[in-house]
Amino acid sequence: MDYDLPTPLEVLRETGPTPFITKAYNIVEDSSTNNIVSWSRDNNSFIVWEPETFALICLPIYFKHNNFSSFVRQLNTYGFKKIDTERWEFANEYFLRGQRHLLKNIRRRKTPSQTQTQILEKFELEREVQGMRRDKAALVIELVRLRQKQETVKTYLRFMEEKLKITERKQQTMMDFLLNKVKESSFLENIKKRKKQGIENLDQSQEIISSHGVEDYETFVKAEPEEYGDQFGGVFGYGDELHIASMEGQREDDGVQREMDSEGIWKAYVLSDEMCILGEHLL
């Protein structure tokens, strides 16, 4: 009878299961801890019945830690899957009861190669560059908007400066005109004449009041303004004794008014009708 025996070289090339898989298999195979961890009914998976006890008693015997979460992560890296959502049951196609020779087929999942890592890094860099380009475009748009706003403000300021210059020129023209008028001798003479005429009108009004006397006062106040001429403007039509008294007091101040200096004449002119005429002329 012929047997296909492996050659010594082929035996050397074969590799056994990893230490983690071997230790995990031994833990499940230990019948003394079946109440903690055991094979399932179909012998194609194993169940950890008491995870806390498993971590405290079983793991320290085979591993240098007692962390159940770390044990589960290691199972995941070797392709084990949790097949029951209500209990800790794990399975792998090569992790079967009584078939230890299949354990060599269980290998750790390969981590991404350097080329894949470089591709991922390149993708991340490209995404960051695209984000920076979008930010740059947004900044350019904002810069254009701010420049337009700046030009608008500059235009408005130039307009206001021109308007201010025009106003200043108008004011200077008005002041030059007024100063020239004040320097004219006829201008001051006209003011003095108007003031003198007003004083004479006041004197005439006082003489009329004095000539009539108190007994004719009622007849005087009842007369129409036209009876005494337009020069009085109907001022006496009110017949108020207080008004007469104020006119008598004003007559006592006539001496002071007649001695007005040039500054007083100028102030009177500012309030006179001629100033209004000059203002209308300038406008």
Image (spheres, helix red, strand yellow):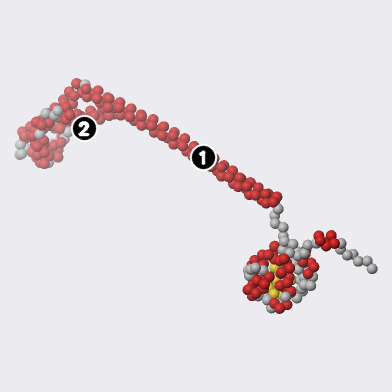
- Name the outermost residue toward the right: 1
Q: Is residue 65 visible?
A: yes
Residue at image mark 2? 271
Residue at image mark 1? 143
Instruction: Name the kind of residue labelled 1 in the image.
Output: Leu
253 to the left or right of 115: left
As helix, strand or loop, the secondary structure at mark 2 comes to loop
How far from the left and from the top, in percent, is residue 20?
71, 66
- Name the outermost residue toward the front: 8
Residue at 13% of width from left, 37% of height from top? 236
Q: Nearer the viewer, residue 165 or 239?
A: 165
Q: Specify few, some or many for label 1: CA neighbours under 10 Å numbering under 14, 14-19, or 20 or more.
A: few
12 to the left or right of 1: left
Residue at 47% of width from left, 35% of height from top? 151
- Name the outermost residue toward the top: 185
Residue at 24% of width from left, 25% of height from top? 179
How far from the left and from the top, in percent, is residue 29?
74, 74
